[in-house]
Amino acid sequence: MGMRRPDRADDERAVARRQLLTWAATGAAVLGTGGALAGCSSSGSASADSANGDSPNDSFSPAAPTDPPAVPGLPVPSATPVGVRSKPVFKVHDLLPTAPSNAVALTIDDGPSRLYTPQVLQLLRKYDIRATFSVVGSEAHANKDVIRQIAADGHVLANHTMTHPQPFSHRSAAQIRQQLTDTQSVVVDAGAPVPTLFRSPGGDWSPTVFQEAARLGLTPIDWDVDPRDWARPGVNKITEKLLAAKPGDILLCHDGGGDRSQTLDALRSVLPALKAKGYAFVTL
């Protein structure tokens, strides 16, 4: 089979990925920090997964720039402020009091990944499960078609900041606001609904983070079952942790930020097993 001729979409993705690399390089200079960072629980910025053509590795670029450059021409979604919370949502019924008593929520962070997210979506279709995807804005901007597919499949999109900087709570109010606002814009620009949920990188919260999220109409969500799949502890360990879920739990997994093959392998057995237990999967 001959090689496919690059089309306009390929060119756009290449430009977006170069921009992600520029952001990462700028961040190293601005913050003066480095090191290999991985995953949502202790993640970095624009992932190598996106910047290096979805190569499956867990080496994140240095800490994200404090103020990522604005992407020109994006829509500015309107926002209806909500009440400021003092803590995030940890349990399904804290947010959805009328959900079934046996409800659990699967949340999937740090994507979308051109390599892993479509495989996750295929698996969710197979078992007729809807999930909540906490997306990183820079990844969403580079993979608009994947964002559209997530929405088309009936899943919920949550805001997970523009570049996943950590520690997020140490940013100023203006910096936090820009991270959230830019992500709202790129998700809408990709053709998906305006997010109403927000997950802070690493579950790092502060009064300022809660205030800025509320200003944009975003409800803060966390988790209570963390298999640390981003660290690639092995399929068995991820599976064991997820299978220990109880009714009302919010489960954390990842489709972006590196090699997520262990996560996929674990979900292939976990999803049907939890359904066999009688659990009902709900979106947040």
Image: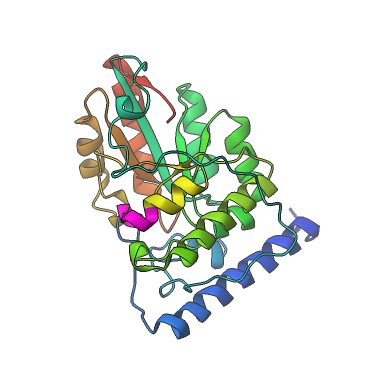
Q: Is residue 203 magenta?
A: yes
Q: Quadrant of residue 107?
A: top left
Residue in the image at 25% along x and 44% along y: 227
Q: Position of residue 200 (x, y in %)?
A: 38, 53
Left/right placement of residue 41 relative to residue 200 reads left
Q: Position of residue 67 (x, y in %)?
A: 52, 72
Is residue 162 at all visible to an observer of this figure?
no
Residue in the image at 28% along x and 37% along y: 90
Q: Quadrant of residue 275?
A: top left
Q: Position of residue 247 (x, y in %)?
A: 25, 22
**Which region shows up in magenta?**
201-209
Residue in the image at 35% along x and 23% along y: 272
Residue in the image at 29% along x and 14% along y: 278
**Residue situated in front as seen by the camera: 34 or 277:** 34
52 relative to 56, above or below = below
**Residue situated in front as seen by the camera: 81 or 19:** 81
Q: Taken as a whole, is the magenta stretch helix, strand or loop?
A: helix
